């Protein structure tokens, strides 16, 4: 009957096996009369796979009840003795498994993850589940995967009346080998009460019996510490309404590809981490020393395993002040010694080592060398420079590390290390990589950043920000750029890493890199309004240049620092730095250095409203730049003179100087400073009451300004354009420009945003945005 029904549906034996979850061997044995009386659940699964209606289902079930072992089929005859060992016997279930480990008494937090799991659970336990569901909880060692899985499994256990399995697959066990599916299936069948002598030895027979027993039943299967998809697939029930919950340090993309729902765990939020610590140590102790509690959470990197180990120390020593524990953690911040337990799952170093030992040689080396990167994240190209490997090899290694949850791919192509994993990698590189190898890797990394930043800066600055760089190390793999958008995108993505690299270069005595890298970043940071970053990085650069005895490096970084301090209204500090720059310029006897320093002094005086003095300094800078033929800088000074002329009320002279600056910037191909010159010309026309001309010049300034290249300058031009539109009575256009200006000023956190908002509030015309 089964064969006829299958043929009537046009199904092969394999297709019916896939549709029903019953093994192909079991179906074949039934069709040939070689199986014992099939279990009711198996028949139900077959009926579902065949999409039988109720009468046909009942008829098939009746035929199964009437079947006798060894009954002859009119077509095939009886089973021969030598084939009896392949017979699939489906015994009656004697035990309802309830194997979940005890829930953690001090579970806290993870509300967002529990909500997502509850949503999945609602689908699984609906009245008409369409298919079994698999959920994969992945994350780094110690992040709390098992704790969350067990806690949630207990909350939904009553929805799986036919049993709950628990199997530790030992994928990351230091003492035992990973469990293979045959061992796991045998144990699960024993949990059903199947006598050992009736448990098959072959994989296919085991899977067939397991799925036959589960057919038509709703069970929960919790598989902990899976290291590979192949460990999991044979253990997944195929009956609708069942749930497989898998925990792994690996992301198991093969399992996700077959429909598993991934939920990747990151370290809990600060609030959740505080709740975990409070539940373990007592709310009163944390309330009494809130700063120490926050310090402990920070030192633990919010990792649940680390928090549990520290909390155990606090609990075991009730008279210890939290501040003393926090101080102890800080004193051992270069090692994992403070997070050592009894080994295995209660020892951070041992837990991380389980994941590390499974890596390929390339993956292990990249992981170790990542500890030399200052963070917060690293691109594939930089990792390749660190490891002196081809980009493709580095990408594969980082993918392996991400799959093992030893790094986090925070955005596509950028990877970060948890603080405790960084400590672990540091310990490993000190063991496995020589000091010379580590130093060479750092040199390649800093060369990669410096030469890439310089290439991007030359595009942004139209080659007016020259530096003399040493040749890059072999395999440093610096990047190249041809457009403003490419340069901006790279600087934007690398900004955090570059800032950290400046500090690290100074710390590791790569002193030239420590002052040249901030100089290469200056124009990007300035145009994006990141003046605090400029000040911080240039201070580091000044210190590095002084330590290296490099006067050219010192004067260069002093001027850029002074510019940033001026923008931050720290005029006294800016003045002292400029004074020192003048002293070095005199010592060097270099006209270009003197001219640049006069230009920075002009900016400081301008910001203080001392326009006449500022004009004297820029005139001297102009004279010096002309004397040595630096036409790009000559154009900049001409524009500055034009701007100061407007401040002094000399509008005709301002327009003439600005027009000259426009022509010269066009001649040298400096679009960024051409935009500034057009804005100065627009301002001069506006002050002269020539509003239509002001509009044309401001719009021209926006046209030539590199897109996204100078947020602050675009905001200034948009405000001026709005003013000109307002003056000619075009209120809608004025509102559009003012809104854009206000948004840009706010983007770079400039107080000018308030004055633009005031213009909008004072205007009576409705905005059209």
Image (spheres, rainbow, N blue to C red):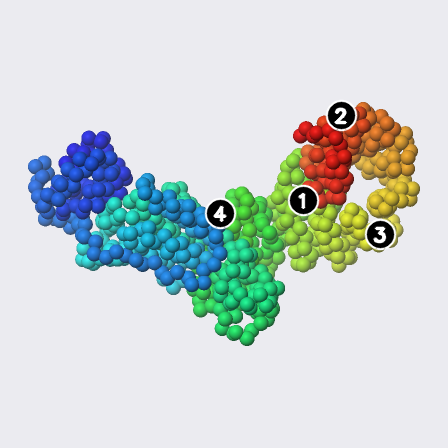
Query: Tag on residue 412?
Result: none
Instruction: Determine the secondary structure under disc 4.
Output: helix
Of the two numbered discs 1 and 2 on the same chain, state the one appearing first in sequence: 1
Of badges 2 and 4, the one in the foreground is 2
Residue 493 point in image, percent of width and height: 62, 44
Nearer the N terminus, badge 2 or badge 4? 4
Instruction: Check disc 4 and report the residue beneath it.
Output: 399
The residue beneath circle 2 is: 730
Residue at the location (40% across, 57% down)? 151
In depth, the one of 731 and 234 nearer the eye is: 731
Give 498 or 762, whichever is nearer the viewer.
762
Asked whether 141 or 367 is in front, the reply is: 141
Relative to 61, 665 lies left or right? right
Query: Residue 154 in the image: x percent, y percent?
Result: 37, 56
Residue sitting at 72 percent across and 31 percent down? 735
- Label 3 neighbourhood size at 10 Å, few (<14), some (14-19), many (20+)? many
Q: CA distance from mark 1 to mark 2?
A: 43 Å
Report the disc number at residue 453.
1
From the top left corner, tell me how far across and down residue 561 is, in percent.
77, 50
Q: CA distance from mark 4 to mark 3?
A: 50 Å
State the residue lying farthest toward the front.
764
Q: Earlier in the sequence, mark 3 or mark 2?
A: 3
Query: Residue at the location (71% across, 44% down)?
Result: 749
Label 1: few (<14), some (14–19) or many (≥20) C-alpha neighbours in 10 Å? many
Which dot, 4 or 3, sits closer to the camera? Answer: 3
Q: Which residue is mark 3?
A: 575
Find numbered disc 1 in the image and state the secondary structure of the residue it sits on.
Answer: helix
Q: Is residue 544 left or right of residue 485?
A: right
Q: Could you give the CA–CA distance between mark 3 and mark 2, rounded to whole angstroms?
A: 43 Å
């Amino acid at each position: 009957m089964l064969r006829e029904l299958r043929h009537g549906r046009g199904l092969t034996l394999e297709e019916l096996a896939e549709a029903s979850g019953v093994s192909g061997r079991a179906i074949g044995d039934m069709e040939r009369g070689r199986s014992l009386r099939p279990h009711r659940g198996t028949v139900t699964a077959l009926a579902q796979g065949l999409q039988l209606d109720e009468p046909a289902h009942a008829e098939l079930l009746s035929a199964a009840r009437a079947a006798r072992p060894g009954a002859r089929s009119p077509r095939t005859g009886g089973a021969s003795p030598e084939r009896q060992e392949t017979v699939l016997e489906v015994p009656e279930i004697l035990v309802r498994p309830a194997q979940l480990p005890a829930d953690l008494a001090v579970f806290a937090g993870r509300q967002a993850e529990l909500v997502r799991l509850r949503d999945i659970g609602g689908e699984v336990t609906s009245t008409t589940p369409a298919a079994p569901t698999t959920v994969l909880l992945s994350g780094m060692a110690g992040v709390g995967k098992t704790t969350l899985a067990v806690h949630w499994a207990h909350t939904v256990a009553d929805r799986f009346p036919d049993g709950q399995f628990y199997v530790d697959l030992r994928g990351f066990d230091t003492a035992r080998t990973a469990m293979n599916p045959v061992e796991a299936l045998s144990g699960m069948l024993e949990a059903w009460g199947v006598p050992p002598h009736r448990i098959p030895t072959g994989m296919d027979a085991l899977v067939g019996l397991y799925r036959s027993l589960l057919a038509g039943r709703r069970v929960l299967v919790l598989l902990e510490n899976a290291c590979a998809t192949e460990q999991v697939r044979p253990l997944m029930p195929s009956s609708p309404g069942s749930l497989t919950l898998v925990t792994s340090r690996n992301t198991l993309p093969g399992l996700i590809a077959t429909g598993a729902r991934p939920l990747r765990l990151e370290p809990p939020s600060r609030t959740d981490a505080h709740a975990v610590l409070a539940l373990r140590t007592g709310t009163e102790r944390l309330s009494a020393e809130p700063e120490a509690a926050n310090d402990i959470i920070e030192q633990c990197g919010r990792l649940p395993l680390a928090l549990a180990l520290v909390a155990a120390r606090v609990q075991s020593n009730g008279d210890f002040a939290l501040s003393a524990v926090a101080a102890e953690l800080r004193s051992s911040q270069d090692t994992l010694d403070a997070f050592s337990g009894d080994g295995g799952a209660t020892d951070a170093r041992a837990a991380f080592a389980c994941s590390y030992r499974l890596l390929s040689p390339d993956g292990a080396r990249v992981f170790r060398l990542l500890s030399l990167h200052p963070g917060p994240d690293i691109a594939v190209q930089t990792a390749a420079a660190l490891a002196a490997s081809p980009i493709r090899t580095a990408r594969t290694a980082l993918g392996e590390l991400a799959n093992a949850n030893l790094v986090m791919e925070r955005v596509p192509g950028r990877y970060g290390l948890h603080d405790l994993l960084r400590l672990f990698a540091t310990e490993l590189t000190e063991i496995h990589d020589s000091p010379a190898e580590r130093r060479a890797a750092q040199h390649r990394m800093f060369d990669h950043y410096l030469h890439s930043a310089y290439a991007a800066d030359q595009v942004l600055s139209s080659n007016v920000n020259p530096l003399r760089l040493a040749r890059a190390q072999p395999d440093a793999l610096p990047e190249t750029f041809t457009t403003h958008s490419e340069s901006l995108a790279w600087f934007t993505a690398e900004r955090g890493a570059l800032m950290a690299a400046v500090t690290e270069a100074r710390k590791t005595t790569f002193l030239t890199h420590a002052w040249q890298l901030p100089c290469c970043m200056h124009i990007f940071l300035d145009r994006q309004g990141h003046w605090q970053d400029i000040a911080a990085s240039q201070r580091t650069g000044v210190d590095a240049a002084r330590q290296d005895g490099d006067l050219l490096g010192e004067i260069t970084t002093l001027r850029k620092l002074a510019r940033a301090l001026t923008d931050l209204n720290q005029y006294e500090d800016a003045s002292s730095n400029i004074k020192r720059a003048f002293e070095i310029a005199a010592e060097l006897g270099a006209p270009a250095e003197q001219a640049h320093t006069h230009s920075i002094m002009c900016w400081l005086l301008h910001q203080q409203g001392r326009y006449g003095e500022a004009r004297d300094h820029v005139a001297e800078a102009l004279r010096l730049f002309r004397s040595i033929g630096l036409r790009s800088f000559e154009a900049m000074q001409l524009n500055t003179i034009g701007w100061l002329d407007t401040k002094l009320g000399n509008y005709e002279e301002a327009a003439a100087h600005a027009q000259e600056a426009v022509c010269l910037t066009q001649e040298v191909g400096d679009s960024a400073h051409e935009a500034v010159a057009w804005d100065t010309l627009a301002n001069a026309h506006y002050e002269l009451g020539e509003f239509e001309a002001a509009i044309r010049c401001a719009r021209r300034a926006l046209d030539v300004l590199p897109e996204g290249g100078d947020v602050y300058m675009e905001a200034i031009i948009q405000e001026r354009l709005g003013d000109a539109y307002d003056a000619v009575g075009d209120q809608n256009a004025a509102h559009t420009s003012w809104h854009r200006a206000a948004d840009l000023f706010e983007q770079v956190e400039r107080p000018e945003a308030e004055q633009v908002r005031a213009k909008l509030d004072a205007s009576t015309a409705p905005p059209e945005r």
